[in-house]
Image: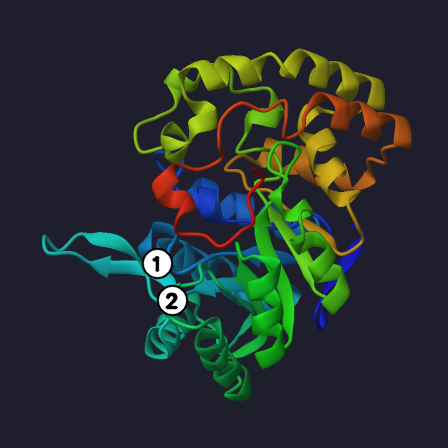
Amino acid sequence: MQGRRIGPFTVSAVSLGCMNLSHAYGTPPPPGQAQALLLRALDLGVTMFDTAALYGFGANETLLGRVLGPHRERFVLAGKGGMAGVAGPDGAPRRVIDGRPEAIRRNCDDSLRRLQTDRIDLYFLHRWDKRVPIEDSVGAMADLVRAGKVRALGLSEVSAATLRRAHAVHPIAAVQSEYSLWSRNVEIAVLQACRDIGAALVAFSPLARGFLTGMLRDAAALPGGDIRRAMPRFQSGNFAANLRLLDGYACIARDAGCSMAQLAIAWVLARGEHVVALPGTTRIAHLEENLGAHATVLDAGVLQRLDALISRGSVSGARYSDATQAEIDTEEFG
């Protein structure tokens, strides 16, 4: 598989987001299925695996440590701190954004223990805690680099202005943001800012949270606990309107000689050599299909047809609820 640069590393252009194996989309797969998928990804040439302290409130990191620990030298390990699970009044974990230096140090140490490793290759600030200057949070992360616990730094879901402020404190190797045909906010300024400072753009949810695979036709069938239930694009009239895009999209995929999923990922990769696609899945068949996108080359005509069909003006609904949107720092289209 072709490689793309992130800081000091060369990683597979299509890497693996591991959140699905423990978090967010209903009941996680059985441990044996998750283990088989991780090992198959490694065998197929995936060289970056992305996790976070938040995913499964540590369960995802524990899974990766157990399964991939024996193969640690074969891949780049990407992790995230600054947002994790904290015990609530009832003892159950709840999601907390905390960018204070002491919280970031604690998150990192906890992650290293669960991951069974002595360093995280690429460490992201999962969300900018707006109560804490970005310079303070990144300064604490820079201390982790100097301590040898982390090798390179990244930020997740930040604006171009915040990225530049952070980069002035310590080089930022990557920004991780949602990026797909139907979530294109990074095109306002972040995509170019990454290029300007020599950072990679790690595109999570390149399949539009499964929508662009064409396999999700009934949002009401989503399992309880699936985070898409709270996303406006998957609700009532918005989802019905968005479904009308899929027939034309399927036609473009057929003409391009690839699957709908491969078309979505290939479009992301075509946005620049500094872009890495980060799809996630729980099924080996889907993993193999997704990885096939690296060999899919889209000509200018296909790219024009895609932009004409799916764009900011043709997608119905915001990508996040108002409450969730308030937690992030990305530029939003008006």
Residue at the bottom extreme of this rendering: 146
Is 128 placed left or right of 158 in the picture? left
On the image, the x and y values in percent for residue 88 come to: 16, 56
Please provide percent x and percent y for residue 210: 54, 29
Given the image, on which type of amino acid does mark 1 rest? Gly
Which residue is located at x 60 percent, y 32 percent?
Answer: 286
Please give the label number shown on residue 147: none
Residue that appears at 64% across and 16% down: 246
Q: Where residue 35 appears, x then y in whole percent? A: 48, 48
Corner quadrant of residue 212: top right
Q: Mark 2 and mark 1 in contact (Cβ < 8 Å)?
A: yes
Q: Residue furthest front?
A: 334
| Residue bearing the label numbered 2 | 114
What type is the residue that disc 2 sits on? Arg
Question: Eyeballing the image, is 96 above or below 241?
Answer: below
Residue tagged 1: 58
Question: Which is in the foreground here, disc 1 or disc 2?
Answer: 1
Compare residues 100 and 23 and report the one nearer the observer.
100
Q: Earlier in the sequence, mark 1 or mark 2?
A: 1
